[in-house]
Structure formats: structure tokens, C-alpha cells
Amino acid sequence: MSKSVKQGSLMMALLPSFILYASTIILVALTRGDLGGTIKYWEFMVPLAALISLMSGWGPTYARNASRFSYLIKQIVHWGLFLGLLWLLQTQGVTAALGAPKYTLVLLYLLSLTIILGGFYLDLKQVLFGAFLAFCTYLLAAPANIAILKPIGETLRIADPQSKPLTMILVVGLIAFAVNAVFVMGTRGAVIAKRTRLAAS
């Protein structure tokens, strides 16, 4: 396989994660100005996150010699329960009672938790994205309480991080994506090694 083909294949493998992180950063930037006005966009984010979560764990499942059918069923149950919970919140009047701004935060915290829990037993690298989304949600929920940015800024040597929340979100997102890329490359290596062994046997 040529170097250009390998690079193209890696870019395709990273594309779903890139879409996920980029979409989140863009939506967070929009939501900071109108917490309740972006709820519809975040609701579209839910099936996108579910689909990418499913795709993300397909390779690791193969590399671990685990059953892909079992993995698929677990993902369907996992995300089905989350979607069922959202349906209950809407049909039982909880969404209307909370109002759009608070419901946006509830949705994002629930989505973060769903991704993190799924990551622990289905695809570990999704824990990174779930944690990143939770971090963004915390900053949206408490824009005046941004003390958490100070130690992060000091670690990354960014001056006055409290006054640059969007910059910090972008930097943290880039770091999380970079770590995610390491996981992806490791998975690709494991998959290639397994296919090589199978071809040689």
C-alpha cells in the first residue's frame, strides 16, 4: 500500500471524530449567545453522536476478536435507552417545564454521560469526547464560574484563560482530538496486524 493511500485511509478513519469535535465546538460557540435557541441543533447532534459512536467501536471490536453482533446489540440498547429517556422527558412535559435553556443543559449533560458510559464498556476513546462535551456544558451552565480554566491555562501556558473560554474550549478540543487520533492509529495497527496474521495462516 502506497504512502498516499495509507494517509488517505487514516484521514477517512479520523473524519467521523473530526466531524464530532468540530460540530461540538461550533455549536458551543453558537449556544453561548443563545442557550435555548440552539436546542434543535443539539437534538440533531444526538443521532450523529450515536452513529459515530457505533462506527468508532467497529474496528476495536474486530481487533479484540469480540463479536460484532454483540457489539451492535449493546450499542442499540445503550442508545435506545437514552433516546427513550429523551422521549419520556418530552412527552411527560418535563421539557416544557424546564424551558429551552435548562433543557439544553440537561440534554448535553445526559448526552455526555451516555457517551462516557458507552465509552467505558464499548469504545474507550469515546470517553474523551464525552468528557470534552461535559467540560463544554459546564462552561455553558456556569459562564461566570470559569475558575476551572485557570489551572488548565497555567498547564498549557495560556495567559488569562478565564477571559478566553472559547479559545480554551478550542485548545482542549484539539488536545482531545489528538489523543483520539492516537487511539485510532493504534486500532488501525491492531486491525492490520490481525489481517496480516489471518492472511498468512
Image: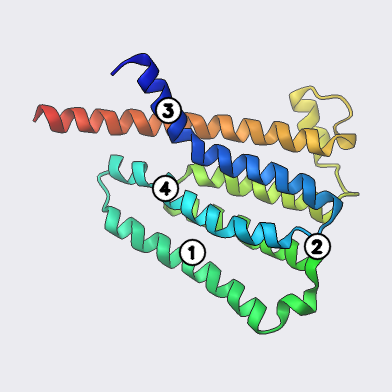
The residue indicated by pointer 4 is 55
Callout 3, which amino acid? Leu
Label 3 close to label 4 by CB (< 8 Å): no
Left or right of 12 in this view: 113: right
Callout 1, which amino acid? Trp
Residue farthest to the left, as pictured: 201
Q: Nearer the viewer, residue 34 or 107?
A: 34
Callout 4, which amino acid? Met
Q: Horizontal and vertical percent for residue 73?
A: 35, 63
Left or right of 133 in this view: 123: left
Q: Horizontal and vertical percent for residue 133?
A: 66, 49
Distance from label 3 to label 1 (Cα)? Answer: 27 Å
Lower sequence index among marks 4 and 2: 2
Q: Quadrant of the C terminus?
A: top left
The circle drawn on residue 36 is 2
The secondary structure type at the circle numbered 4 is helix
The secondary structure type at the circle numbered 2 is loop
Q: Nearer the viewer, residue 144 or 154?
A: 144
Give the quadrant of residue 163. Answer: top right
The circle drawn on residue 79 is 1
Left or right of 33 in this view: 138: left
Distance from label 1 to label 4 (Cα)? Answer: 13 Å
